[in-house]
Image (cartoon, rainbow, N blue to C red):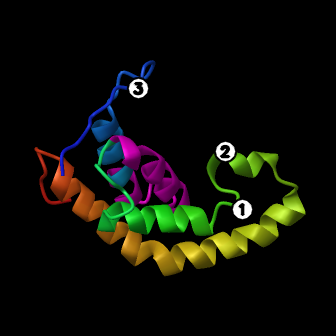
Amino acid sequence: MVAKDSQDPGSGENTREKVLKTARAILKGELGIIEGARLLSTLAPDLVADWKVDPDFLVLAALDSETDDLPVGKQKKLWDATALAEREKVVARIEAEAKQNVEAACRNILRRFDAHQSDH
């Protein structure tokens, strides 16, 4: 598949670089599984010809869709503390279940799109 590599005005970082940075952050544990999958799934349409048939981005988009009602990242600040505590248990369970598949997708994405890939 050919990468579109579109520019995001304002950040100076192209889509491919954002995808690689995000995939690495997930693998290093610097970014949550759900939050990272959400970001990668939003970037996918600008990187691959059809994310709906791309096995790696499809995994990420599916997790994004299944968890769109869960608070992660900056969204957590908007939630009531009691409700947040309850939902964080669900987030932790889903992230534990999805971790292996998301990390495999991230490793594949790094292999596919990082011209300077070294073993991470």
Location of residue 3 in the rendering, given as x and y in whole percent from the top left corner? 22, 42
Q: Residue furthest top?
A: 10
Q: Quadrant of the C terminus?
A: bottom left
Disc 2, SS? helix
42 up-or-down from 93: above or below: above
66 up-or-down from 36: above or below: below
The mark that comes first in sequence, 2 or 3, is: 3
Q: Residue at x 61, y 73 (%)?
A: 92
Location of residue 63 in the rendering, given as x and y in whole percent from the top left corner? 52, 67
Magenta span includes 1: no
Disc 1, SS? loop
Q: Can the viewer see residue 1 in this picture?
A: yes
Q: Residue at x 32, y 52 (%)?
A: 24
Determine the CA span between mark 2 and mark 1.
14 Å
Q: Amino acid at mark 3?
A: Asp
Say few, some or many: other residues with alpha carbon within 10 Å of mark 3 (under 14 / 14 to 19 / 20 or more). Answer: few
Q: Residue at x 88, y 55 (%)?
A: 80
- Residue matched to label 2: 74
- Residue matched to label 3: 8
- Residue matched to label 1: 69
